[in-house]
Image: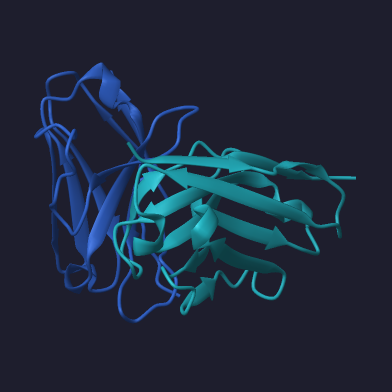
Chain colours: A cyan, B blue
Amino acid sequence: EVQLVESGGGLVQPGRSLRLSCAASGFTFDDYAMHWVRQAPGKGLEWVSGISWNSDSIGYADSVKGRFTISRDNAKNSLYLQMNSLRAEDTALYYCAKDSGSGWTYFQHWGQGTLVTVSS
Amino acid sequence: SYVLTQPPSVSVAPGKTARITCGGNNIGSQSVHWYQQKPGQAPVLVIYYDSGRPSGIPERFSGSSSGNTATLTISRVEAGDEADYYCQVWGSSSDHPPFGTGTKVTVL
């Protein structure tokens, strides 16, 4: 059974940093691309970033480009999101999502999310 | 950027058919995926590549796409189908996989 468990969320002041982690199990992690998708309170889904199976291909939403960095450690079956210069508008539930393939196709499985609140 | 437009809400009586549209420029030439999100839960994939159905998703869920509109159809609607539904496209013309605006399905 595919399991994706996010961690690292919390309350952080504007301008500070936070690092999210996603622990994956139940599948061959380095066969699949992975993504972060977020959802602000009461709002819709927004893709944040994606990374191919071997980290060769990485993409970011315009809203986070230059501030967020996605990475993965295939040896540890883990996905990360380093978030710098956080803003109030980054407040959201952040989901880790497994792609259906090694590239970018669709979000086949989702974790339960970790909440990030940016507030002074 | 590519914009996907969905109706904010759809209401349907139990046992009837719900149709949720997703409008986008020439969306029929793209691959469309659909997600169901129940309150307080993570999204779940219900349709992939326009009309594919993941294992565990009831046959009552089906999808189609043509021209500027993709459609998710839920037949014989049940109370448990009440949720938000999002379409998603990742076409070759974009590096970003936009989601639709979302549709809240209410079962009367």
Q: Position of residue A105 (x, y in %)?
A: 31, 64
Q: Which residue is depicted at the point 72% across and 60% down? A: A83
Residue B97 against residue A40 in the figure, above or below: below
Q: Position of residue A84 (x, y in %)?
A: 77, 63
Question: B42 or B81, which is in the foreground?
Answer: B42
Residue A13 against residue B24 in the figure, above or below: above
Question: Where, quadrant-wise, is the C terminus of chain B in this rendering?
Answer: top left
Tell me if residue A70 can be seen.
yes
In screen coordinates, is B71 left or right of B36?
Answer: left
Q: Which residue is depicted at the point 45% across and 75% down? A: B1
In screen coordinates, is A76 left or right of B42?
Answer: right
In screen coordinates, is A53 left or right of B51?
Answer: right
Q: Which residue is depicted at the point 46% across and 78% down? A: A57
> In the rendered image, which quarter is residue A42 located in?
top right
The number of numbered discs placed on residues in the rendered structure image is: 0
Question: A16 or B76, which is in the foreground?
Answer: A16
Residue A16 against residue B59 in the figure, above or below: below
Q: Position of residue B54 (x, y in %)?
A: 19, 43
Instruction: Identify the residue at the far front of this view.
Output: A75
Question: A115 or A39, which is in the foreground?
Answer: A115
Tell me if residue A32 can be seen.
no
In screen coordinates, is A66 left or right of B38?
Answer: right
Instruction: Identify the residue at the far right of this view.
Output: A120
Q: Which residue is depicted at the point 61% across and 57% down? A: A80
